Amino acid sequence: MKIKFVVCGLPISPVSTWGEIKKYKNEGSPAYSLEDYWRVKGLEVNTEFEKEILKTRKKIGIPKEGLKYGEINTHYHPEDYVWITEVNLRNKTVAFDKSVDFETERILNEFDCDLFVSKQIKPILLGNIVLPLSSYISDSGEISIKTLFTEDDLDREEYIKNEKELLIRITSNVKPEAIRQFIRDRYDLFTELLKKLPEKKKFELSKKKIAVYQLKKEGLPYKEIAFKLVENTDDNPMSTKAIEKISTRVISDIESLFHKKCDK
């Protein structure tokens, strides 16, 4: 399964590589962290995830390869993407949309998902794309400078409970030092509010780790995997013990992105 990254909202054609994502990030567009990029790469080779997506598409009438990119905006319209026209909203197929929402919720109830993955089930189900999320725009502590509330709302318990986002609102052209001072002056408050947000675990993958995962899935022994990894490269061969260690960790990491919940 190949999954593409949408930047700046649905109208802009999706991209595939980290270099393309960095280009948009450097231009100030909403994009993704490097960790989230590797989360998507891990999902691409998570066979349980692909099987569930293809099964669900067949169930609700989505083509095996997903909807064409231009069709997705008819069925996916989060509030952030205000570019969607009234015509699109009037013409949307309500029954289909309800089926998509129902199946998305079912998947989230039946499978344990990484936090980032859980927010991307619907767009991937519709058409093999992921969308930028406001709380993931920045790489520095996952802080987004965007909000719908005022400074006085920062200590509202119900806001944190319901939204699970902590944001900083900037409404005038202030100096960066003023922002740093604002945070320093409210250090204790931010400490308490941050405790209410979900934990985000560190996530690291690489081409070599994914290769180990795929070769292990094919049933190859560690010795043969080590040979395959250096077959077309100048890399030094790795020991079977090192391959086994990588394999154990990478299987756990990739399957943690999406897996069937255990019966309780």
Image: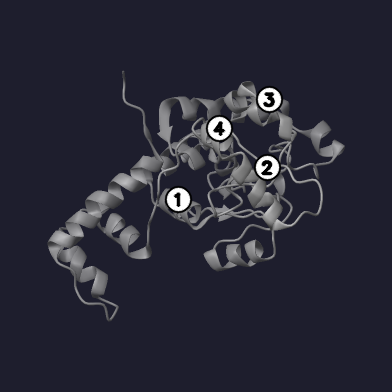
Disc 2 to disc 1, C-alpha distance: 26 Å
Q: Earlier in the sequence, mark 4 or mark 1?
A: 1
Q: Quadrant of residue 12?
A: bottom right
Q: In this figure, which colouring scheme has been used for the structure?
A: one colour
Give whichever of 163, 172 is nearer the camera. 172
Foreground label between 2 and 1: 2
Judging by the rendered image, the residue that carries numbered circle 4 is 193
Q: Residue at (29%, 55%) from the top-left corner?
A: 213
Give yes or no for contact between labels 4 and 3 (Cβ–Cβ under 8 Å).
Answer: no
- Left or right of 68 in this view: 256: left
Q: Earlier in the sequence, mark 1 or mark 3?
A: 1
Give yes or no for contact between labels 1 and 3 (Cβ–Cβ under 8 Å).
Answer: no
Q: Earlier in the sequence, mark 2 or mark 1?
A: 1
Judging by the rendered image, the residue that carries numbered circle 2 is 168
The local secondary structure at tag 2 comes to loop
What x and y, as percent, mark residue 221?
A: 15, 58
Q: Which mark is residue 95?
A: 3
Q: Residues within 10 Å of mark 4 (few under 14, many from 20)?
A: some
What x and y, as percent, mark residue 175?
A: 74, 57
